[in-house]
Image: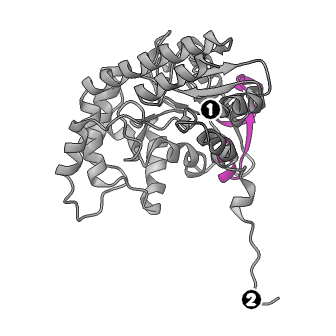
């Protein structure tokens, strides 16, 4: 018919949104006396530190547009944090802010102009947004922990510490992957949003000289303030590394109007410049981890990996949805492992992001199970 245009709905190419599928189990958990304790999503529950809130308020008068590149002092704060905390040297011009790290993960393959049909390698058990980012770019994703097996890979995602498994890649292993990728002119991007939360091992950034040598060519790292600073509601993350790739991302983001609000930039500077609140929040998570680890193993569950990050990767040796239902009957919501790939089909992810009182309640409910 004249004047009628056909189109393919992007929404039809995407999987069901995971948390929508979990909703009936959350409803069942809410029927438990005392209500539900949600250990599924992993959203921060502790207050945003006052030093950050004060910076946001002080910058509230912001009538002008921010830039896609971000303020010079913001990029300098990111650079200083990388060197101080991770022993990584990145010039401020090789840093680019994002509207949360999830936005960066979902958009990097598209913004870097990967050709339709290109192959994007994601971890075998992985945060779903790596696959979504590939689909949005018209690419094919391959889930494997051996990227070397994908000879024509255009981009490789690493996630260390990993979500949901809490696994940590050694500097040697990351160096092997980077060396292989450079030989093929593939890009390597590492999602490092949990890097300050190592428990049994000290995570290393992919931008560290022990991994990449003296050059960041072909390599990017994505960071977030959501977990370590309770800043998830502000939406701030950043990507750093290869100067040319950062320039390509910036060129597209300028045209698309992808800009971090000025007050949030000031809040991020405060967060990146203050280490004390990070240590306090880390201690909160350490205590909660110890309690949840003890009660889960006490009821016979096995915890795999979980050497770092905000989650316990646990199994009862049964299909994950059976375990989700078992927890829901006790008023507790956990995440089924198959959200992260078929390899997670017998595990559940248990988040540490609950208040001390809620964690104590979980311990009481499970101890009585």
Residue shown at the point (59%, 42%) measured from the top left: 30
* Residue furthest left in the image: 58
Residue 88 in view here: no
Left or right? Give the position of 344 relative to 275: right
Q: Residues within 10 Å of mark 2 (few under 14, many from 20)?
A: few
Q: Residues within 10 Å of mark 1 (few under 14, many from 20)?
A: many
* Residue furthest right in the image: 1
Please provide percent x and percent y for residue 258: 43, 57
Left or right? Give the position of 272 relative to 116: left
In the image, residue 152 lies in the stretch drawn in magenta: yes
- Who is closer to the viewer here, 163 or 39? 39
Residue shown at the point (72%, 44%) measured from the top left: 118
- Name the image quarter holding the N terminus: bottom right
Q: Which residues are drawn in magenta?
A: 131-157
Q: Nearer the viewer, mark 1 or mark 2?
A: 1
The numbered mark, 1 or 2, whose residue comes first in the sequence reads 2
* Residue furthest front in the image: 33
Left or right? Give the position of 65 relative to 356: left
- Who is closer to the viewer here, 220 or 84? 84
Element at badge 2?
loop
Residue shown at the point (77%, 75%) measured from the top left: 6
Q: Write down the residue under mark 1.
A: 334
Q: Write down the residue under mark 2.
A: 3
In the image, residue 26 lies in the stretch drawn in magenta: no
Q: Quadrant of residue 300?
A: top right
Count of residue discs: 2
Element at badge 1?
loop
- Who is closer to the viewer here, 323 or 190? 323
């Amino acid at each position: 018919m004249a004047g009628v245009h056909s189109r393919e709905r992007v929404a039809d190419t995407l999987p069901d949104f995971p948390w929508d599928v979990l909703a009936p189990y959350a409803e069942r958990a809410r029927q438990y006396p005392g209500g539900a304790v949600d250990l599924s999503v992993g959203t921060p529950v502790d207050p945003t530190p006052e030093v950050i809130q004060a910076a946001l308020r002080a910058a509230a008068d912001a009538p002008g547009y921010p830039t896609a590149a971000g303020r010079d002092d913001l990029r300098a704060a990111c650079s200083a944090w990388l060197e101080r905390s991770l022993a990584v040297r990145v010039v401020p011009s090789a840093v680019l802010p994002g509207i949360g790290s999830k936005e960066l993960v979902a958009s990097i393959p598209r913004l870097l102009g990967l050709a339709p049909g290109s192959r994007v390698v994601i971890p075998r058990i992985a945060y779903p947004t790596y696959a979504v980012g590939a689909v949005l770019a018209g690419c094919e994703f391959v889930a494997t922990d051996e990227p070397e097996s994908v000879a024509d890979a255009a981009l490789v995602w690493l996630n260390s510490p990993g979500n949901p498994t809490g696994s940590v890649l050694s500097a040697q292993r990351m160096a092997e992957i980077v060396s292989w990728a450079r030989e093929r002119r593939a890009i390597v991007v590492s999602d490092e949003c949990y890097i300050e939360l190592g428990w049994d091992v000290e995570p290393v950034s992919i931008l560290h000289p022990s991994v990449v040598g003296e050059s960041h060519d072909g390599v990017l790292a994505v960071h977030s303030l959501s977990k370590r600073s309770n800043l998830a509601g502000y939406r701030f993350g950043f990507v750093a590394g290869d100067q040319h790739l950062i320039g390509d991302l910036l060129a597209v983001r300028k045209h698309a109007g992808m800009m971090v609000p000025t007050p949030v930039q000031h809040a991020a500077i405060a967060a990146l410049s203050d280490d004390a609140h990070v240590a306090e929040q880390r201690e909160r998570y350490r205590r909660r981890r110890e309690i949840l680890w003890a009660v889960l193993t006490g009821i016979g569950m096995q915890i795999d990996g979980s050497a770092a990050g905000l989650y316990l990767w646990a199994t009862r040796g049964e299909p994950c949805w059976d375990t989700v239902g078992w927890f829901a009957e006790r008023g507790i919501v956990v995440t089924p492992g198959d959200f992260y790939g078929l390899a997670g089909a017998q595990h559940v992810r248990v988040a540490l992001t609950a208040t001390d009182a809620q964690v104590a309640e979980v311990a009481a409910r499970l101890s009585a199970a």
